């Protein structure tokens, strides 16, 4: 068979390769490449797609759905797109650091319009490939320039992709206590205990709001104590803010911790994503900010960030950044956006309440208060891996093994079915 | 005390600094022959009419949304992009041993390929495997491979400055003396920066040595359609290597041939021995993508996929592919050209004549228009007369 194929090629090309080519065809460069395991989060969606059960539910990846279970393109996004299309802009390369109109607005959104940091020019904000790209640039930057410490402390648990990103960038991963499985809430004392032992100058990762995967956020008084302790320990703070607006429905409230830390003198690094709060998932819109000592340092840091970005992808994609910039910089679109984010957050809060009400209706005697207390897109149900497996196998409800569900995938139409399933595996 | 007190100021990336300096130059006669982006005869950036058409289609289609693409990208983009490189009727495609990863531009495709090779090519740690790039080459090649962890990035002879052409003997010599399994980055067409490509016979000689010495073929195809004006002609080398049975990578960029520079549309085409090897390779590519950008941007890929997969739009793109609106459809000049000006002469051109070109003497032919060509020609003349 192989011989026949290669003679066909020979006659097509008109060249007669030496017989040696046949033995080369037998071996491969890639024989030793192992099959990589499916991504734990994105793999869930793929399994869901293959399922033929009409009642199936995808509670895996955190992408917002409306009450019909459909992806939701924000109205302000459609308007911004129409405005942009009418302008007939060119497609010239962006600067390595991205679209200026976007990066400025991105920093203002996180830090507040009047923030002293922005006014003094001591932040550098670059456009990145959404949250992942931002974290990766940050990790690369720390790996290259934060040579005093190699350790990054993540909350336990954290977003599954944090660990491989930092590891691939050459950092070492450690953890601090965060989630209390007994209460399905925040283990404040446990966190303080662990943080107090972190070696000076280590990097500590904090989720700005809507902690992923648990949905458990510290209260403001708790944030204050954490900020104080982190300062005492002289740690470098890396904030991951992927859900600004999505947690409480209020942009400023969700950025409170970030702004507080800066006020307290922490020169943080910050990753932002517009995947969820603007529904721009596939457009890959994000920002990475370094708060520096002064504008001069910011310039040096900026030059180094560019050196890191160039050999990865040269410069970032325009489309999403242009949409985000248009929304952030156009007053009535901005106002509309705030309303839509509020609406999305509210729908999720309503679903939480409905889920608990339905569980009670099913006759569940478990304590489900945490479903309501947790905040943002995700809920850490407290389900164990075996229960999760049953929920998937018997009810076609797809979620990650850690018991995390994306509330965004819950609708008034399927919340009853979900409650049935959860009750069935937990009674 | 700042954690970043010791961070040194980095030298700016040359080609973008050049564009920046050009922007700030008040001289009305200024000319930018730096960055490789197409320009109309008025010196303006140009969006292809077919791109505008498809953008309109996308904006008006309410059934489309902004959901995440799969990790490896938009499937219809990946497969149609690979067909562009390898040919619709490529036996490798028919044998199900061609796969692809949608990436952020040609840079992103090179990056993904480099990261994969470092981890999986010849054992699990290829940090010491030599990577050869042409002398000269696109300046970012070095950084892409170095940042992917390759410690030994070396030049292979390519440009003969004296005879102003390909140094074939030098090239073949370096292929013969390279350690076995070395990785070679080959420019599929329209070599950047020299504009000089091997002939078919010369490519055949290169392939023969590479096969015999088990060297890895990594094509960089950033200008398919731009060199000769014909997609198939420009892909001859890539396709020839496929027929020779190589397993190889081809990093494709759609920045230039679609004019989609800022949407970052690229594709890493992978030709493997068989579909089983391909499957495993793609699964590992996913892991690398996931820790770099998770999944690629949708707009540009969608645009290209719709164009390539819709016959009338594809035809429209082919005729625009030569790049010049309304004029000739074949284009013999290569995109870049090496003027032969030395660094001092280049500086003179920039400072005295406001003509911006790379320190290497490379000019982007697309920066020349009927309106500035006389000024540029005079300037080159004045420069070589006054500066040695």
Image: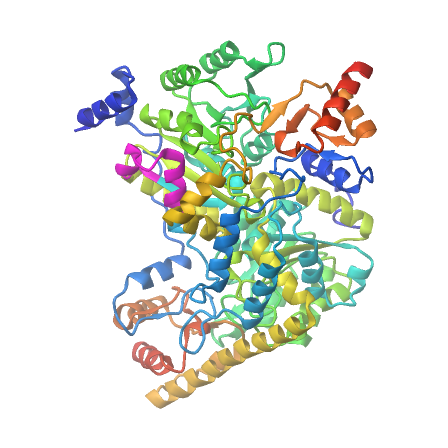
- Residue B234 drawn at (x, y percent): 45, 29
Residue in the image at 32% along x and 26% along y: B243
Task: Judge whether B154 appears above or below A213 on screen.
Answer: above
Q: What stretch is highlighted in magenta?
A: B77-98
Question: In the picture, residue A107 is in which quadrant?
Answer: bottom right
Q: Position of residue B109 (x, y in %)?
A: 49, 39
Identify which residue, A1 or A336, lies in the foreground: A336
Relative placement, left or right, of B259 versus A56 is right
Residue placed most toward the observer, A128 or B126: A128
Majority SS type along the magenta span:
helix
- The C terminus of chain A, quarter of image: bottom left
Instruction: Judge whether B196 appears above or below A371 on screen.
Output: above
Q: Quadrant of residue B203?
A: top left
Q: Residue at x 55, y 54 (%)?
A: A174
Residue B94 on the magenta span: yes
Disc tally is 0
Percent across and percent down for residue B212 are: 36, 16
- Residue A106 in view here: yes
The answer to which of A401 and A183 lies nearer the viewer is A401
B66 with respect to A108 (left or right):
left
Horizontal side of residue B145 vs B117, given as left or right: right
> Where the N terminus of chain A falls, by quadrant?
top left
Scheme of colours in the image: rainbow
Viewer-proximal residue among B205 and B255:
B255
Residue B284 visible, this angle: no
Question: Which residue corresponds to the image point at 71% horizontal and 19% vertical from the top-left?
Answer: B341
């Amino acid at each position: 068979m192989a011989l026949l194929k290669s003679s066909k090629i020979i006659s097509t090309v008109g060249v007669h390769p030496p017989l040696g080519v046949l033995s080369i065809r037998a071996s491969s460069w890639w024989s030793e490449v192992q099959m990589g395991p499916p991504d734990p989060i994105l793999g869930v969606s793929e399994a869901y797609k293959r399922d033929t059960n009409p009642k199936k539910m995808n509670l895996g990846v955190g992408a917002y759905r409306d009450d019909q279970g459909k992806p939701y393109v924000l109205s302000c996004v459609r308007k911004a797109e129409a405005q942009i299309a009418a302008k007939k802009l060119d497609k010239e390369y962006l600067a390595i650091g991205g679209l200026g109109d976007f990066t400025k607005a991105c920093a203002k959104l996180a830090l507040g319009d009047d923030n002293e940091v922005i006014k003094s020019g001591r932040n550098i904000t670059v456009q990145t490939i959404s949250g992942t790209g931002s974290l990766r640039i940050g990790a690369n930057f720390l790996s290259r320039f934060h040579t005093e410490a190699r350790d990054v402390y993540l909350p336990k648990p954290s977003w599954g992709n944090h660990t491989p990103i930092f590891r691939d960038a050459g950092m070492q991963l450690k953890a601090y206590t965060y989630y209390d499985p007994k209460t399905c809430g925040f283990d404040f004392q446990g966190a303080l205990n662990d943080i107090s032992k972190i070696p000076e100058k280590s990097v500590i990762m904090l989720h700005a709001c809507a902690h992923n995967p648990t949905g458990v956020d510290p209260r403001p008084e708790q944030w204050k104590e954490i900020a104080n302790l982190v300062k005492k320990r002289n740690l470098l703070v890396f904030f991951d803010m992927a859900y600004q607006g999505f947690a409480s429905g209020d942009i400023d409230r969700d950025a409170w911790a970030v702004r507080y830390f800066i006020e307290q003198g922490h020169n943080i690094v910050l990753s932002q994503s517009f995947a969820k709060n603007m529904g721009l998932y596939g457009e890959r819109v994000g920002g990475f900010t370094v708060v520096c000592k002064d504008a001069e340092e910011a310039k040096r840091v900026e030059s180094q960030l560019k050196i890191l970005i160039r050999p990865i992808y040269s410069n970032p994609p325009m489309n999403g950044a242009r949409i985000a910039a248009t929304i952030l910089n156009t007053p009535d679109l901005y106002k509309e956006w705030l309303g839509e984010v509020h609406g999305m957050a509210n729908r999720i809060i309503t679903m939480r309440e409905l889920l608990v009400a339905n569980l009670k209706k099913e006759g569940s005697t478990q304590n489900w208060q945490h479903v309501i207390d947790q905040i943002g897109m995700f809920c850490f149900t407290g389900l164990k891996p075996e229960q999760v497996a049953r929920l998937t196998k018997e009810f076609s409800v797809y979620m990650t093994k850690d018991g995390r569900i994306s509330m965004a995938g819950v609708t008034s139409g399927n919340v009853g079915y979900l409650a049935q399933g959860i009750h069935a595996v937990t009674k | 005390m700042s954690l970043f007190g010791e961070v040194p100021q980095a030298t700016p990336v040359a080609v973008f600094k050049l564009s920046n300096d050009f922007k700030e130059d008040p001289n009305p006669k200024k000319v930018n022959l730096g960055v490789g982006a197409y320009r109309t005869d008025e010196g303006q950036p140009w969006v292809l009419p077919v791109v505008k058409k498809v953008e309109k289609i996308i904006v008006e289609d309410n059934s489309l949304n902004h959901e995440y693409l799969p990790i490896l990208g938009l499937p219809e983009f990946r497969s149609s992009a690979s067909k562009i490189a390898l040919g619709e009727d490529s036996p490798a495609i028919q044998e199900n041993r061609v796969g692809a990863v949608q990436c952020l531009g040609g840079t992103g495709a090179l990056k993904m390929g480099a990261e994969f090779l470092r981890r999986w090519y010849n054992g699990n740690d290829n940090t010491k495997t030599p990577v050869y790039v042409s002398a000269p080459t696109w300046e970012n090649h070095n950084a892409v491979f170095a940042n992917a962890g390759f410690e030994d990035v070396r030049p292979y002879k390519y440009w003969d400055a004296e005879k102003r052409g390909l140094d074939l003997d030098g090239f073949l010599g370096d292929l013969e003396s390279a350690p076995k399994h070395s990785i070679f980055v080959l420019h599929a067409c329209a070599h950047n920066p020299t504009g000089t490509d091997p002939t078919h016979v010369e490519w055949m000689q290169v392939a023969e040595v590479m096969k015999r010495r088990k060297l890895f073929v990594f094509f960089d195809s950033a200008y398919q359609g731009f060199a000769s004006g014909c997609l198939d002609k420009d892909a001859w080398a890539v396709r020839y290597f496929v027929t020779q049975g190589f397993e190889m990578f081809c990093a494709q960029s759609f920045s230039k041939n679609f004019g989609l520079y800022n949407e970052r549309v690229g594709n890493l085409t992978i030709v493997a021995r068989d579909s089983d090897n391909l499957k495993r390779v793609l699964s590992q590519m996913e892991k690398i993508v996931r820790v770099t950008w998770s999944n690629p941007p949708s707009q540009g890929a969608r645009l290209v996929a719709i164009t390539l997969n819709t016959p009338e739009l594809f035809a429209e793109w082919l005729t625009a592919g030569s790049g010049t609106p309304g004029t000739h459809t074949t284009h013999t000049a290569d995109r870049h050209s090496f003027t032969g000006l030395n660094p001092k002469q280049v500086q003179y051109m920039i400072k005295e004549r406001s003509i911006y070109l790379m320190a290497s003497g490379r000019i982007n032919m697309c920066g020349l228009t009927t309106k500035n060509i006389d000024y540029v020609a005079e300037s080159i003349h004045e420069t070589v007369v006054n500066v040695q």
